[in-house]
Amino acid sequence: MVRLMEEGMRNHTCFMLILRQHFGACEAQLAYDYYKFACPNVESTVRNAVLGVVFTDPTAPASFLRLLFQDCQVQGCDASILLDSKPLDGNFEIASGMNFGIRKKETIHLIKYKLEAECPGRVSCADIIAFAAKVSVALSGGPNIQIPLGRKDSTTSSRHAADVKIPPPNITVDTLLDVFVSKGLDLEESVAIMGAHTLGGGHCINIVDRLFDGQPDDLMNPSFKAMLRLLCPTKKPLTNLTIVPNDKISWLLISTTVNMFLMGKDLFTIDSRI
């Protein structure tokens, strides 16, 4: 029981740290009951939509959490990651290579469409993204987190900003710590986020350097490395669709991640250096 409580607190802390990084000047405008009168059914609408997606795709919670982090990391939690054009001109945030593999944007758009029918012009896409991530935590075995609402949507988006602001998988520990400290987090909080990705997985393109660089990674478990080479058999992946699981149960919020690191079963370079 104590262990379960500790896991819940850790998952709660890491989720809230992502949001806290970017409250900034708008913090005073956020409120837990922001939609109490403006759109009282917003939470149930988001929850039902996310639940429907997770029922058909158990990996969806990780996608919603990543969508939140990538959005917040660039210019605050403002839904700028949803902006694009047709045809895509390459200058939008979503076009950045750092956003490779981003999924479930269409679900956010669908939820926005439903809410517009109920509460026209009231609920921001930024809050829908945050709500979807909150629901994903609960559906994955984590706590039901209460989050403040009232974020505003951005009308601008920058690929360059995403290239600069979103940490790559081969970033060094010191550099990543600097990134989080610049957002107002202390050392302990930064390390908590760095070791908290217990949901989801990765793509071959982000780990092949550890498998085929000609210099064996002594920190990686040999049997784990062999398994990864079966999933990612070439240095230049033939497809970007292969998903490499992060741990044994990649669809649940459990506290095995750090133990996996200690056994040398970590996907990304940054994990092995923590």
Image (tube, grey):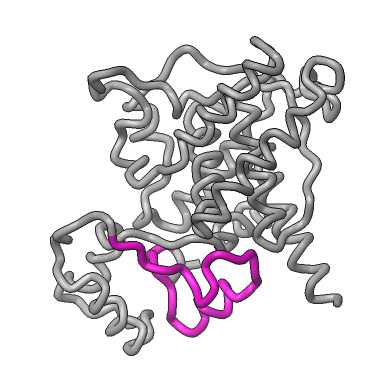
* Image coordinates for residue 30, horizontal then vertical, percent: 77, 23
Vertical order, 240 against 150 (above or below) = below
Magenta residues: mostly which secondary structure? loop
Q: Is residue 150 left or right of residue 94?
A: right
How many marks do you count on the picture?
Answer: 0
Q: Position of residue 40 (x, y in %)?
A: 82, 24
Question: From what the image shows, is residue 20 above or below residue 208?
Answer: above
Q: Is residue 264 magenta?
A: yes
Looking at the image, which is closer to me, 57 or 176? 57
The magenta span reads: 242-270
Which quadrant holds residue 218? bottom left
Identify which residue is drawn at 79% across, 20% down. 28
Farthest residue in the bottom direction? 223
Point out the image quarter for the N terminus. bottom right
Q: Is residue 257 highlighted in magenta?
A: yes
Q: Position of residue 193 (x, y in %)?
A: 60, 55
The answer to whether 126 is drawn above or below residue 191 in the figure is above
Residue at (56% x, 24% y) in the render = 78
Q: Position of residue 57 (x, y in %)?
A: 49, 56
Q: Is residue 245 left or right of residue 47?
A: left
Q: Residue at x 37, y 55 (%)?
A: 169
Instruction: Give the residue displayed 40% in from the left and 43% down from the top.
Output: 102
